[in-house]
Amino acid sequence: NLEPLPPPMPPADRNRLVPTIQFEMFQNDKLKLKALTEAHGYNERDLHNIYQRITWDASADAKAVGADIAGNKMKPELQERVSRACSIAVGATLATEESPRGKLLDVGCGHGAIVSSLVEAGLTEPDMYVGIDLSPEMVRNAVERYGEERNGRTGKGRVFVADDFFAHDFSVYAEGNGGSEEGVFDSIIFCSSLHDLPDMEGAISKAVSLLRPNGGKLVIVHPQGAMHVIGQHQANPVMVSRGLPTANEWIDLIEKFSDWGLSLEHVPADPRSDGDIKDGYLAVFKKT
């Protein structure tokens, strides 16, 4: 299994960055949560999802309105990184003789944060898009902003679903696929979301099963970079269980799980590197 990139925060750094009373409260809360999980039969993934849902539900309206005010654009250098990733993901959905379907899955879609970027990249028909997020409040905001547009030919629009990525049945989006969820999507994108999932290795395995062979693309992007995610992990290891995989970790994973059938097309910059500062985190895979 993947292990967190950084070691636990040293006591000296913790004392410098985290007030003592806040750390003590955190330790006490951990003990309370442990007792609750044991009493109610929750496992570690359940606990992680509860944290995530509460956090994102509480911030959904504020984040969505903030995005509205900003014109659904990030700072120019961050937006450029997201736009690049979206172009790669959309490129795999464009209809070909081998793949006329054209479906994209946005994992951790939030309030529809990258929908406009995907449209600008060429995802012109709304029914080519499916977004999933654990937070019902995030999904409500996404539906309010991007759920009404329809494909004039099919009458179908974008799909936003509030559910656990690991548990959701994606076969409902298959067309002529015999009721199976395997190979439903031409591309899958995780934009600033992979690190929020409780099991990165499991998330990639799930995504691979949903991705069509012979050219399906898996795109993982974090515009603020790998080092930013390490900081999030150090500050809150319950919400962010580890840093994003390094290039070497991806190579090892692809070798370990050869049945995934993935080839690494774009190698992500390592944390603390000039590339991470300049370009953020971008890993692109092709399914053979």
Image (cartoon, rainbow, N blue to C red):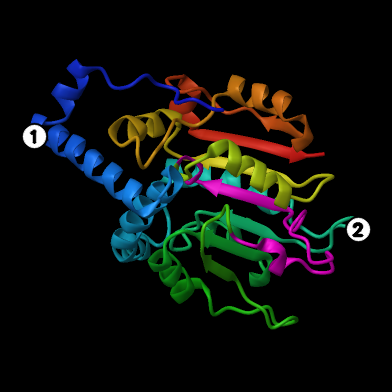
25 left or right of 117? left
Query: In the rendering, at what x and y percent does residue 216 appear?
Result: 76, 47
Q: Quadrant of the N terminus?
A: top right
Residue at image point 47% right, 47% down:
79
28 left or right of 269? left
Quadrant in which residue 256 is drawn: top right
Please give the range of residues in magenta.
168-195
Query: In the rendering, at what x and y percent does residue 223 appear?
Result: 46, 40
Residue extending farthest to the right is 97
Q: Would you name the residue on which mark 2 appears?
A: 97
Residue 182 belongs to the span the image colors magenta: yes
Is residue 261 visible to the viewer in this orientation of the structure?
A: no
**Is there a contact, CB below 8 Å, between mark 2 and mark 1?**
no
Dot 1 lies on which element? helix
Query: In the rendering, at what x and y percent does residue 224 appear?
Result: 42, 37
Between the C-alphas of marks 2 and 1, the distance is 62 Å
Give above or below for 112 relative to 11.
below
Residue extending farthest to the left is 21
Of 167 and 123, nearer the camera is 167
Q: Which mark is residue 21?
A: 1
- The type of residue carrying mark 2 is Glu
Mark 2 is surrounded, within 10 Å at the Cα level, by few (under 14), some (14 to 19) or many (20 or more) other residues, namely few
